[in-house]
Amino acid sequence: MLRPKNGLMTYLLTVSLLLLSGCSQSTAQDVKRVPGGYLLSEQAMRDTVAGWTADRESARVLRQGMDELRAEIAAQAEDTRRLVADLRRELAAERAAYNRRIRRGRAQGLLLGLMIGAAGVAIAK
């Protein structure tokens, strides 16, 4: 029988046994305190091992699900980055077109103002 080296392992084993004893056919009679640890009946040991196996499988399934979620989140983040980059490019193109129209309008206004001013000077003479 393996004996825990510190109090934490003893505590964890006791808690797992108590949790499993409520869920399994074994009862508290199946657990006996002996010097240096605990002694379980064969059925209690089988139940404990079955519980640990089920917990290990649950943890594996959860890890696999988390990995799939991480991959999905990474793909979504990449799509979002791509979308934001496209939007920024479109905004920059629209801003450049708007600025060109403004400059063209200013130039036309200046040219029209010069022509009207020249005509006014010519008429005034």
Image: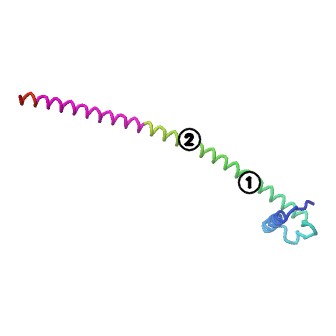
Inter-mark Cα distance, 2 to 1: 28 Å
Residues packed near mark 2 inside 10 Å, few (<14), some (14 to 19) or many (20 plus): few
> What's the colour scheme?
rainbow
Eye-nearest disc, 2 or 1: 2
Sequence-earlier tag: 2 or 1: 1
Task: Identify the residue at image location x=91%, y=59%.
Answer: 2
Tell me the kind of residue under disc 1. Ala
Q: Which residues are magenta?
A: 90-119
Residue 24 visible here: no
Name the image quarter holding residue 110.
top left
Q: In the figure, is residue 62 to the left or right of 36?
A: left
Q: Which residue is mark 2?
A: 78
Is the residue 89 above or below the residue 16 in the image?
above
Residues packed near mark 1 inside 10 Å, few (<14), some (14 to 19) or many (20 plus): few
Q: Secondary structure at mark 1?
A: helix
Residue 43: x %, y % from top left: 88, 63
Tell which residue pokes out farthest to the bottom in this image: 29
Tell me the kind of residue under disc 2. Glu
Q: In the figure, is residue 69 to the left or right of 102?
A: right
Residue 107: x %, y % from top left: 25, 31
Return the residue nearer the eye: 37 or 25. 37
Is residue 103 a member of the stretch shown in magenta?
yes
